[in-house]
Image (tube, grey):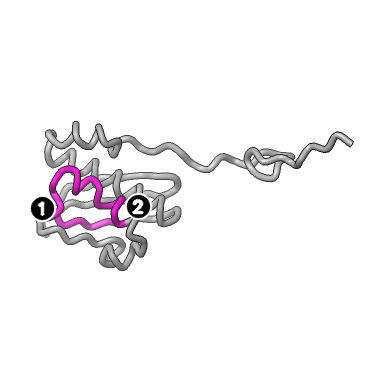
Amino acid sequence: MAQYIESVGRRKTSSARVRLYPGEGEIVVNDLPMEEYFGRALDRMILKQPLVITGTENTYNISIHVRGGGDGGQAGAVRHGISRALCETDDNLRPVLKAAGFLTRDARAKERKKPGLKRARKAKQYTKR
């Protein structure tokens, strides 16, 4: 087995384990080709952003195991994981990825529902009379 670099990325309730192997740019997500796993072009674009911005699209084969959350959250988790793995391969890529905001764990998540309200903040309409 080839030597690889492993890292973890997270977003909302999704968690992605990313392995970077030296190769020619093949991306496999949960044992499926990336195009098959992520149907939306937006999710595929989000996943590839760190590779495009650093110019390493055809340098690594990437194996990804992602679980939890929905499609958008999983794509964000994979992007975070790939960015962290790229930083381990080359320290010179860190400033570029940091400036793009790919190394920061996006902490935004759904706010909890409050008692007496319909959702987190939506309340019943107030009637004076």
User: Which residue is the site of mark 1?
Assistant: 59
Q: In which quadrant will I find the C terminus?
A: top right
Residue found 44% across the figure and 45% down from its top: 12
The residue range painted magenta reads 44-65
Residue drawn at x 10%, y 57% is 23
Q: Position of residue 105 (x, y in %)?
A: 35, 37
Q: Which is nearer the N-term, disc 2 or disc 1?
A: 1
Left-right relation of 124 to 51? right
Query: Residue 88 lies in magenta, yes or no?
Result: no
Q: Which mark is residue 75?
A: 2
The part of the image, by quadrant, that contains residue 42 is bottom left
| Image coordinates for residue 96, horizontal then vertical, percent | 19, 35
Q: How many marks?
A: 2
Image quadrant holding the N terminus, namely bottom left
Nearer-the-camera pick, 5 or 1: 5
Q: Amino acid at mark 2?
A: Ala
Type of residue at label 1? Thr
Q: Residue at x 35, y 48 (%)?
A: 76
In this view, which residue lies farthest toward the right? 129
Label 2, label 1: how far apart the Cα atoms are: 20 Å
In which image quadrant can residue 40 be found? Answer: bottom left
Compared with residue 88, is residue 22 higher up or lower down, i.e. above or below?
A: below
